[in-house]
Amino acid sequence: MKFLRLFLGLAVTVLLATCARRPTKLEIYDVVINHVNIVDVLTGELRPNQVVAIAKGKIVEIQVADKKSYAAKQYVNGNGRYLIPGLWDMHVHFRGGDSLIAANKKSLTLFLAHGITTVRDAGGDLTSSVYQWRSELEAGRIAGPNIFTSGPKIDGPQAYWPGSLEVETPAQIRQALDSLQRLKVDYVKIYDSKISGQAYLNTIKYAQRRGMKTTGHMPYSVKLSEAVKNGLDATEHLYYVFKACSSKEDSLTALVKASLSTSKPLGLFAVLPTIYDTYSPAAATRIFQLMAKRQTAAVPTLHIQKTLAELPGNDHSQDTLRAYIDPKIQATYARRLASARLQSPTANAFSRKLNAKFMSLIPLMQAEGVPILAGSDSGPFNSFIYPGASLQDELLLLVKAGLTPLQALQTATINGARFMGVASRTGTIAPGKDADLLLLTANPLEDINNIKKIDAVISRGKAYPAPALANLMRAIKNQ
């Protein structure tokens, strides 16, 4: 009798538990990707035969695929395919004034079609338009990447780029930061065309006190170590890192400072050959270790360096993607082209030599723990740096420089999310994370070129299969 009561009690318990697990109604997901291989960009592990369910812009479930059926508004076939987080381009520009607003907006399509689901706008003069696009993107009225923006750049008096906030005194710096905070920018971008060394360091210091991230170019009258110690969060391009790798950095910095009061101030390009000749592995190690300790990131932008160095000898008239670049933006390339054609053979040879040296710095920074962020520098005035495709080419160059495919993927996924302080909700594939994803037909861990083999992009929880992406591209193609 005791055994019978025990048996009946267990049966009732099992029945109640089964009933408790049974859903009251069938859940309909927005997107389901079935039988897919998930690439873990944190560990490099591959999780085969997974099902990913997405609702309201979020990943809500990841399970081993079995016979369980999932109801969804969109089904995406993941069989034989590889799922990675959507790519981040951490250095783009939307700029050129009101006449280029529509032309810049077309680049949103190019980013998405190439698997870029997040971009970081590194300063321009279209801030109000960028915010408008961001609202339209979030509302689902247009398709394109998430946008982080610095708003207007901070620079010195008579700044080179239109729309810059010009500062020199502490009061002007505070006023500029007040303005950026009212705009609710995501970080502060500093440019070096006219800003003084002291104003540059003060901008970093004052911004840090307000909890604002800072990044940008740097006047050669300042040492990178000074900027890092003041709280600089990232340095754009490698010119400023390279100067810190010189055994003569102190004397070169003093020389630049002294020249500023003369009729012929020394600029970056005048000093670079000497920096090249005085490169010191010991100095490089010191600055990389300091950057790693302070978690100051570097955005190498190798692809644009290579493209511009090769402009004199390359014919871009037959570039496939040129047909998708608005003619008004193509017109902005004239200045770079004219400058490249005036370059002497000696200067051109040095540019190529410098690019090779920059490439050699990448594995050294990675080994020391410097956060590396992938960025293309695409945008008006930057000749033939095509939105989307240029970020893919940046990853290829990072691998050529010495990173593994996994490390290169990290520069364009989790590293960007960490830098912007949003890694808790994006940058990796896990339940609860944003559904910004890229589906590939081949494994990018085996060959980084496979990031170009796109089968679908998932942006804000909506799937764009390859045919849909092709339709978006056709809509922006020049007539």
Image: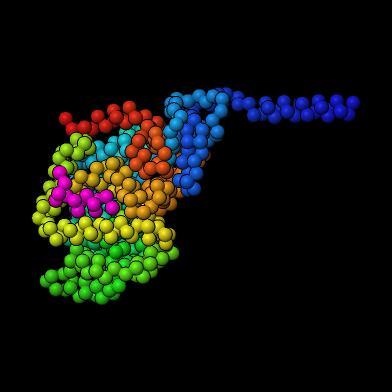
Magenta segment: 302-315
Q: Position of residue 261 (x, y in %)?
A: 16, 73
Picture quadrant where residue 170 is located = bottom left
Q: Residue at x 85, y 25 (%)?
A: 4
Q: What secondary structure is the magenta-colored segment mainly?
A: helix
In the shown orientation, is residue 2 left or right of residue 190?
right
Q: Residue at x 44, y 37 (%)?
A: 83
Q: Position of residue 274 (x, y in %)?
A: 22, 69
Q: Position of residue 112 (x, y in %)?
A: 32, 37
Q: Depth check: give the residue in front, 447 or 180.
A: 447
Specify whether residue 304 is painted magenta.
yes
Coloring basis for residues: rainbow
Q: Position of residue 159 (x, y in %)?
A: 19, 59
In the shown orientation, is residue 343 left or right of residue 29?
left
Image quadrant for the C terminus? top left
Image quadrant for the N terminus? top right
Residue 27 lies, with reference to residue 418, above or below; the image says above
